[in-house]
Image (cartoon, rainbow, N blue to C red):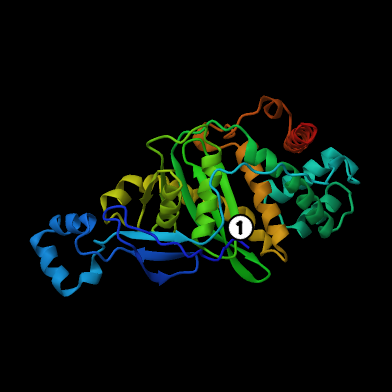
Amino acid sequence: MYFLESPSHTFRCPHCLKALEKIKERKDYYIHKCKNDDCSFYQTNLRRMTPQEKEQFQHTPYAFKVRYLYREFLFDFKPLAPSSPIKTKVDVSRLSVSSHTLGLILTYHVNYGLSARKTASIMKDVHGLSISHQTVINYANSVALIVKPFIDQFPYELSGSFCGDETYIRIKGRWHDLFFMFDAIKKVVLSYRVSPNRDTFSAIRAIDDVLKKLPSIPEDLSFVVDGNPIYLLAQHFFAQHGISFDVRQVIGLTNEDPVSEEYRPLKQIMERFNRTFKGNYRPTHGFGAEEGSVSFVTLFVAYFNFLRPHSALEKRVPVVIPALESLPHMPARWAKLIAMAQEMLAQQAAS
């Protein structure tokens, strides 16, 4: 699906122009190495070694990465490619429920993290409206399709302090990975991808979601992430496409290196966000289909970015939209957010 058969190219070292030798095959990429002992890259790295490192190199050369390596990625993915307009067939106005009632359902189900069954029960017990838990799920799936383009294409004002992390979500009894990318200062979720695997391609797509939201790629762009090597591989992938950024990896639970000490506060902000998400997700006890999980995550991000007041922002929402802020209660804000998302889709369809 995402992977292509590797063409029979001959890759050459940019430092000595000798042909590279394929030394390893991984699921997502092949590794090619320059084995020329006269290569300037290799010789420079040898000269930079301390006497102790040179002695160790004689006994365990495999412990040092001194030769030029090239990773040939096997998936067909173009960074910063424009997304195709989403043509959803869902029309909320045709649902057999008023906009206020739909807003109530989303408030209970998303804002307060109630399961679909509890949401259906509270609509019956408090509001006298009989609906099934499957109806709650259907409404959530429909609204998620509508608001997702609005979330992804909104012109956010970003700070440049980006961090990422993965958490877990249960689908059909199996754990899946959920990749979040987050503006730690503005408190805006920029990527929220559900994946069956914690792999390089998922990390690339998550970072690409952030890059698409930037008016231009700043020279000092960096991402604060954990010690998972997939982010370094993603960095290599983007570098091959002329897109450069730094990856600051915060390792472990204690500050054993200067990078971890400097950037751990940003990582902790990301971890607090994960705990907030899990607080809303836990009552669902997982999902029976991938569609349900994606819908729930999408609606949570819509709530977090546009509707949820944040203590670090003096009780303001991360993304202030005056048309939402002026409304008296949360069901009305959900209804207005849905209407704005539908209006954007209609404009895209007309253009």
Quarter of the image where one finds residue 132: bottom right
The residue located at (24%, 64%) in the rendering is: 36
With respect to residue 183, does 276 lie above or below? below
* The quadrant where residue 327 appears: top right
Judge whether residue 229 can be spotted in this image: no
54 shown above or below 128: below
Q: Between 59 and 98, which is closer to the camera in this rendering?
A: 59
- Image coords of residue 331 (percent x, y): 76, 38
Spot occupied by residue 54 in the image (x, y as percentages of width and height):
12, 65
- How many other residues sit within 10 Å of disc 1, few (<14), some (14-19) or many (≥20)? many
In this rendering, position of residue 72 left or right of residue 209: left
Q: Is 13 on the left-hand or right-hand side of 80?
A: left
Residue 5 x %, y %? 55, 66
342 to the left or right of 271: right
* Front-most of residues 248 and 217: 217
Residue on which the image places disc 1: 194
Please tell me whether residue 187 is drawn above or below residue 321 in the rendered image. Answer: below
Position of residue 189 relative to residue 255, above or below, is above
Q: Which residue type does callout 1 highlight?
A: Val
Q: Is residue 146 visible?
A: yes
Which quarter of the rendered picture does the N terminus lie within?
A: bottom right
From the viewer's side, name the closer residue of 192 and 104.
192
Q: Secondary structure at mark 1?
A: strand
Q: Position of residue 214 (x, y in %)?
A: 52, 35
Q: Residue at x 72, y 58 (%)?
A: 292
- Write the residue at 23% across / 65% down: 64
Q: Residue furthest left?
A: 51
Q: Quadrant of residue 62?
A: bottom left
Determine the residue located farthest toward the bottom in the rendered image.
Answer: 59
What quarter of the picture does the C terminus occupy? top right
